[in-house]
Amino acid sequence: MNRREVLQQVAWLMGGTLSAPAMLGVLDGCRAAENPTWKPRFLSEGQAELVAEVAEIMIPRTATPGAKDVGVPAFIDAMLKDTYPREDRERYLSGLEAFDAAARAAHGEGFVRLDAPRRLALVQRIHDIALAEESAAGPHARTLRRPFILMTKELALLGFFTSRVGATQVLQYVAIPGSYHACVPLAQAGDGKTWAVETGGRF
């Protein structure tokens, strides 16, 4: 897998920019991997559960595995612990608490205790507000102080597309390229999927 390709794809999904710690973490080799015995090293158990549920809403299980299936929550926890500066980590945690407080204010219960429709509606509402504020702030402000919901989205996408499933089932992947075929339609070349490696070229 070409990590620079992944960064380009996720940057496009995030409106053209990625935060510096996220890029450096991926380029240094951070990736998501299935690990059913994973325990958080930075987040508390409760925080990790909330982050996992938000990530799963952003990348749900469909015909392919979802965020939790491929190890995205563990990836987010590791990235926060190992690559983000203290200021960003503190902003993430305070944003997480504010997000859970918004769930309590709206519904009388914390986010993880809400039913699926109310979870989805809350994530969508807060995501759309944050995205509109980021767009209004301009490209230079985007990478400096991303809020919890957009940091989670950025890390969830990076984790998913660096996972085995994301690279091989969602993006095009050829471990050992075969014969050369010039000038064929994209749909014929690979079902219209973007390539995960240089060899061929959700929320």
Image (cartoon, helix red, strand yellow):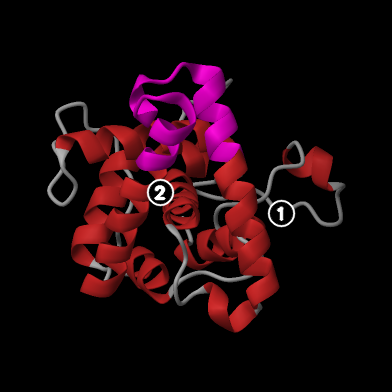
Q: Is label 1 in contact with label 2 (beta carbons under 8 Å)?
A: no
**Quadrant where the image shows the C terminus:** top right
Asked if residue 30 is among those painted magenta in the image, a careful observer would answer no
Q: Position of residue 195 (x, y in %)?
A: 63, 51
Asked if residue 122 is among those painted magenta in the image, a careful observer would answer yes
**SS class, disc 2:** helix
x 19%, y 47%: residue: 43
- Residue range of the region highlighted in magenta in the rendering: 100-124
Residues 83 and 42: in front is 42
Residues 172 and 11: in front is 11
Q: Which mark is residue 159?
A: 2
Q: Is residue 93 left or right of residue 66?
A: left
**SS class, disc 1:** loop
Q: Is residue 29 left or right of residue 188?
A: left
Q: Earlier in the sequence, mark 1 or mark 2?
A: 2
Q: Looking at the image, how many numbered discs can be counted on the residues?
A: 2
x 53%, y 23%: residue: 118
* Real-space CA distance between mark 1 and mark 2, rounded to the nearest whole angstrom: 31 Å
Q: Position of residue 114 (x, y in %)?
A: 42, 20
Pointer 1: what residue?
180
Crowd tier of the residue under label 1, counting other residues whose Cα lies within 10 Å: few below 14, some 14–19, many 20 or above: few
Q: What kind of secondary structure does the magenta stretch mostly adopt?
A: helix
Q: In the image, which is nearer the foreground, mark 1 or mark 2? A: 2
Q: Is residue 61 visible?
A: no
Crowd tier of the residue under label 2, counting other residues whose Cα lies within 10 Å: few below 14, some 14–19, many 20 or above: many
Outermost residue to the top = 115
- Amino acid on which the number 1 mark rests in the picture: Tyr
x 27%, y 69%: residue: 84
Residues 48 and 107: in front is 107
